[in-house]
Image: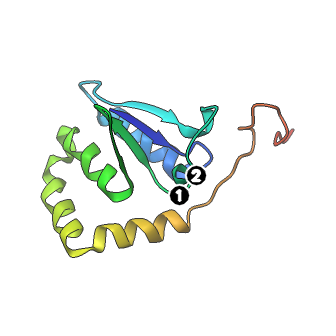
């Protein structure tokens, strides 16, 4: 499973790092979509995963990731309940909409470099 996160988002990067540490079986691959030459505009709005030719995004992607991390299994039933109630998608959209993007020192061409 490939997880496409936003490398300009501190929260997204931190979350991906935590998931990577919880991925004992190395089932997950992490990639900032910002490092791709081309990507969908939707990737700027939500987390995306690709697994066996299928794409998932947003809260559904979080549920799928959690199913593959043994330490997260206890939360999976609650994630499904939140999904069923519509709360999971609602909360996810609120957080995604209000996240902060900081492209400092992330640009390939150096145009957003800040010298100390």
Image quadrant where one finds the N terminus: top left
Residue 16: image location, x then y, percent: 43, 41
Asked if disc 2 and disc 1 are in contact, CB closer than 8 Å, the reply is yes
Q: CA distance from mark 2 to mark 1?
A: 7 Å
Number of numbered discs visible in the structure rendering: 2
The residue depicted at 68 percent of the width and 51 percent of the height is: 102
| SS label for mark 2 | helix
In the image, residue 76 lies at what x, y percent? 17, 54
Specify few, some or many for label 2: CA neighbours under 10 Å numbering under 14, 14-19, or 20 or more: few
Q: Name the front one of labels 2 and 1.
A: 2
Residue at figure coordinates x 21%, y 75% from the top left = 85
Of 53 and 29, which appears nearest the observer? 53
Q: Residues within 10 Å of mark 1 (few under 14, many from 20)?
A: some
The percent coordinates of residue 93 (x first, y second) are: 44, 68
Secondary structure beneath disc 1? loop
Left or right: 71, with 34 as reference point: left
Which quadrant is the C terminus positioned in? top right
Please give left or right for residue 82 compared with residue 9 in the image. left
Answer with left or right where residue 28 lies relative to residue 69: right
Q: Read off the residue under disc 2.
A: 41
Q: Which mark is residue 57?
A: none
Q: Is residue 94 above or below residue 4?
A: below
In percent of width and height, residue 18 lies at 39, 41
Which residue is painted at 15% across and 47% down in the image?
73
Specify how the rendered protein is coloured. Answer: rainbow
Q: Residue furthest top?
A: 26
Is 9 left, or right, of 77 in this rendering? right
Q: Which residue is mark 1?
A: 45
Instruction: Look at 61% across and 32% down and name the residue there.
Output: 35
């Amino acid at each position: 499973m490939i997880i496409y996160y936003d490398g300009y988002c501190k929260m997204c990067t931190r979350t991906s790092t935590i998931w990577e540490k919880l991925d004992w079986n190395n089932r997950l691959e992490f990639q900032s979509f910002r490092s791709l030459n081309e990507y969908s505009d939707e990737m700027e709005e939500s987390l995306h995963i690709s697994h066996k030719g299928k794409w998932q995004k947003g809260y559904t992607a979080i549920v799928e990731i959690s199913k593959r991390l043994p330490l997260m299994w206890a939360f999976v039933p609650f994630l499904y309940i939140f999904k069923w109630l519509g709360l999971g998608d609602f909360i996810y959209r609120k957080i995604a909409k209000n996240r902060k993007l900081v492209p400092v020192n992330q640009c390939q061409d150096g145009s957003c470099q800040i010298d100390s």
